[in-house]
Amino acid sequence: MILEVAVLNVKPGRTQDFEKDFQIATQYISSIEGYLKHSLQKCIEVDNQYLLLVEWTSVEAHEVGFRQSPQYQQWKALLHHYYDPFPQVLHYESI
């Protein structure tokens, strides 16, 4: 199992719209082979910051299976305009 981690900084004043669109976007990521589960956490101290955690079977399931899919284009259209700056996405594995 691989854990994708992204800190999402949403433009001020856009958090409610982001949360609504994120709920729609979940259908796209969850339809990808190799997707296991995800969670979106809202930061208590920083009002417009979120932590996205996605479990994948492999890095390739995320980087190739999702990012090269038509579903990713829909995900991107719904969500990417909310971020400032664009998030760094890293992958982690259990040791």
Image (cartoon, rainbow, N blue to C red):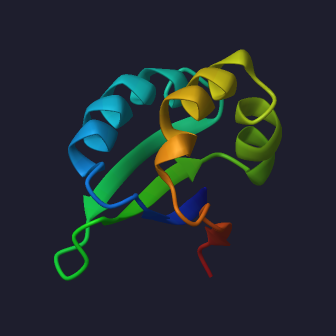
> In the picture provided, is 52 more to the left or to the right than 80?
left
Judge from the rendering whether residue 65 lies leftward or rightward of residue 85; answer left or right.
right
Residue 57 appears at what percent x and percent y?
65, 46
Q: Percent from the top left, x then y, of residue 35? A: 57, 36
Q: At 78% from the left edge and 45% from the top edge, which residue is drawn?
A: 63
Q: Quadrant of the N terminus?
A: bottom right
Question: Would residue 19 appear left or right of 80 to someone viewing this image?
Answer: left
- In this rendering, position of residue 71 left or right of residue 37: right
**Residue at the location (64% across, 71% down)?**
93
At 56% across and 43% down in the image, what residue appears? 80
Residue at 52 percent across and 62 percent down: it is 84
Of residue 82 and residue 60, the one placed in the foreground of this image is 82
> Whole-percent x and y of residue 77?
58, 28
Q: Position of residue 34 (x, y in %)?
A: 64, 35
Q: Classify 15 as above or below 4.
A: above
The extreme front residue here reads 13
Give the quadrant of residue 62.
top right
Please state the total of marks drawn on the protein image: 0
Q: Residue furthest left?
A: 44
60 shown above or below 93: above
**Quadrant assignment for the C terminus:** bottom right
- Height in image: 46 above or below 66? below
Q: Nearer the viewer, residue 16 or 62?
A: 16
Residue nearest the viewer, comparing 60 with 40: 40
